[in-house]
Amino acid sequence: MSESATTNSKAQKKQSLAAIIAASSVGTMIEWYDFYIFGSLATIIATKFFPDGNPTAAFLSTLATFAAGFVVRPFGAIFFGRLGDLIGRKYTFMVTLLLMGGATFMIGLIPSYETIGFLAPTLVLLLRLLQGLALGGEYGGAATYVAEHSPADKRGFWTSWIQITATAGLFVSLIVIQLTQNSMSKEAFAEWGWRVPFLVSIIMVYVSVLIRKNMHESPLFAKAKAEGKTSTNPLKESFGNRYNFKFVLLALLGATMGQGVVWYTGQFYALSFLQKVMTIDLQQSNALMTYALMLGTPFFVLFGWLSDKIGRKGIMLAGMLIAILSYRPIYEKMYQTTNIQNKTEVVEKTTVGITRTLDKKDGVETKDSLIVTTTKKEYTDGTQFEESKIEKILADASAAPVKPEIKKLVTINDSDKWTLIWLVFIQVIFVTMVYGPIAAFLVEMFPTRIRYTSMSLPYHIGNGVFGGLLPTIATALVASAGKANDIAKEAGEALPNAAPYLEGLWYPIVIAGICFVIGLLYINGKDRNVND
């Protein structure tokens, strides 16, 4: 063969691999977008699909519904992983894409709680479960498909493009939300505009299906199938075989469990912390996350590439350890950056407005009344603060008084904005260290005939259960610490928690710490063979 022909052959092969990566990544990114759009809009969804009266309970209910999608991901991994090892990678993750897209579109159509009552949160929960099942089958298929096409010395680099898709999905969800918000008034967005990001996903799913339908089956799986070496019972071989099951447990307890909590702390919990604890304006907090994700995303590929040179295990464990040591200082700095107690108020700018209105129950005016007191303050560095206190005055004097509802909103200045972007960006770097190499790491742990099933389950338990439950558990820990402080304050006792806003971080710190020790002691991480 001539030198020219050899060069053309290599270019064609490289172009073909690039096309495979692109087709796999676009579809997986859209699935992540569909899955995470719910979490990105959690604050608004809490007011639409759950009863009024207790904003904290409604938000926790929304996070619990969000987490439900993660909890069922392992079941999706088992179901679709089995199909992927029986009939092939390509067709399986085509089905997961359609299932995810349909469920997301339907969430955008569900009437609010005011319209259909408890049927609203019930339907949302069912659709979130479908999303979780779909995602449980998608990631393992895409990662396996790409890895089985990749050369051994560049497997970390090529599979890291699949790793980008999770963060890219969150990034795109924030961009779509911001574009929608900027195209209408705040009132319109709160009323109906929040549905748009759910509904437009159907267009992206359609485009991805057109791209994926022309993809060919993985060469390693096609070869195994032609030779009659595929598994007839992937579940039994994956989890019934003690030797293979040991590696499933090691993948979970020594890698994906810690990777999952680091991923969700650096992205979803960071966003939740900005919005719920620091009470930063929704558009500003979304913009902060967008900038941080945009700056951090290239590092997925960097650490994937680096894992081909120096190994996957060391990079992932280093990411966990640095995160464990850094989380509390980082979040303390975030909190204090916008803490108005540290700022000088422009006294003459303070305004207080009081509005008294009749309360309504089921659309009928009652003799109860509401007193809404709004206080607006401005600080010398440009920070603005607004607090609304809503007091319900009951006509029945013998009834138990209703605790006032207090809503706070901070609008930050440019200097604080870039400080927070930097602090979130650092967390995204931790994410890229633990997540960039992990697809190649998991693929290399298991043989071709049961790879889809074996790698999908530990991945989705680590990410779906340990990681997915993080926002709910961390928010509950913060709320519990704050409540304990309130009780102590009313009793005139010393506060049990000096920094209750940091209590949620104990969950990722402990889980990542356990994972780091197990991974360090028991995982070898040197086997790069995927042809077995």
Image: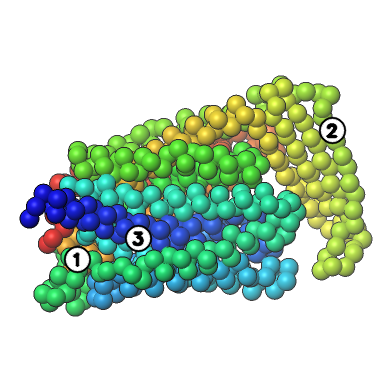
Q: Position of residue 275 (x, y in %)?
A: 61, 44
Residue appearing at x 35%, y 60% in the figure: 24
Q: Where does the C terminus fall, quadrant-wise?
A: bottom left
The amino acid pointed to by label 3 is: Ser
Closest to the camera, between mark 1 and mark 2, is 1
Q: Which mark is residue 24?
A: 3
Q: CA distance from mark 1 to mark 2?
A: 69 Å
Q: Which mark is residue 487?
A: none
Q: Position of residue 473 (x, y in %)?
A: 50, 51
The mark nearer the N terminus, 1 or 3, is 3
Q: Which mark is residue 351?
A: 2
Residue appearing at x 25%, y 39% in the figure: 306
Q: SS of the residue at dot 3?
A: helix
The amino acid pointed to by label 2 is: Thr
- Pointers 1 and 2 in contact (CB under 8 A)? no
Residue 86 image-quadrant placement? bottom left
Is 64 on the left or on the right of 369, as rendered?
Answer: left
Q: CA distance from mark 1 to mark 3?
A: 15 Å
Camera-nearest residue between 366 and 183:
183
